Amino acid sequence: MNKTNRLQKIMGEKNLSVGQLARMSGMSVATISRIERCEEDPKQSTMIAISKALKMKVCDVFNIDWRR
């Protein structure tokens, strides 16, 4: 599963809109939207902010294997 589908799935499970996640994470709606659509690779700080807002680990939200 790619990062976009994973983020979309999590947002759906938590019943969050792009706007809500943007407010919760301190990111702009445009940034969250671009990340969600795979138009932008998020910076590390952005991934951390989104993950904290979702109360999840970065690797669980963005499906990153840090050991690679």
Image (spheres, rainbow, N blue to C red):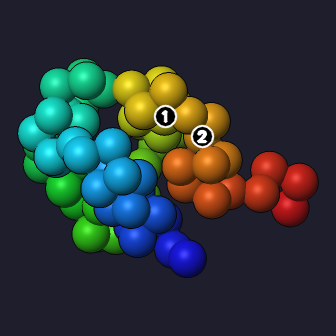
Disc 1 to disc 2, how far (Cα)?
5 Å
Q: Residue at x 46, y 63 (%)?
A: 6
Q: Residue 7 carries which label?
A: none
Would residue 31 be visible to someone looking at this image?
no
Q: How crowded is mark 1: few (under 14 residues within 10 Å), some or many (20 or more)?
A: some
Of the pair 18 and 15, the residue shown nearer to us: 15
Name the residue type under label 1: Ser
Residue linked to disc 2: 58
Mark found first going from the N terminus, 1 or 2: 1
Identified by mark 2, the residue type is Val
- Is 43 placed above or below 48 here? below
Q: Position of residue 19 (x, y in %)?
A: 10, 39
Question: x and y percent of residue 66 in the render?
Answer: 80, 50
Q: Position of residue 5 (x, y in %)?
A: 40, 71
On screen, 49 above or below 29? Answer: above
Question: In this view, which residue lies farthest toward the right?
Answer: 67
Quarter of the rendering occupied by the C terminus: bottom right
User: In which image quadrant can residue 37 be found?
Assistant: bottom left
Q: Mark 1 points at which residue?
A: 51
Q: What element carries label 2?
A: helix
Label 1 close to label 2 by CB (< 8 Å): yes
Q: Position of residue 15 (x, y in %)?
A: 24, 46
Q: What element carries label 1?
A: helix
Quadrant assignment for the N terminus: bottom right
Question: Along the horizontal axis of the image, is 53 left or right of 15?
Answer: right
Which residue: 25% across, 24% down?
A: 24
Q: How many marks?
A: 2
Residue at the limit of the structure toward the bottom, as seen here? 1
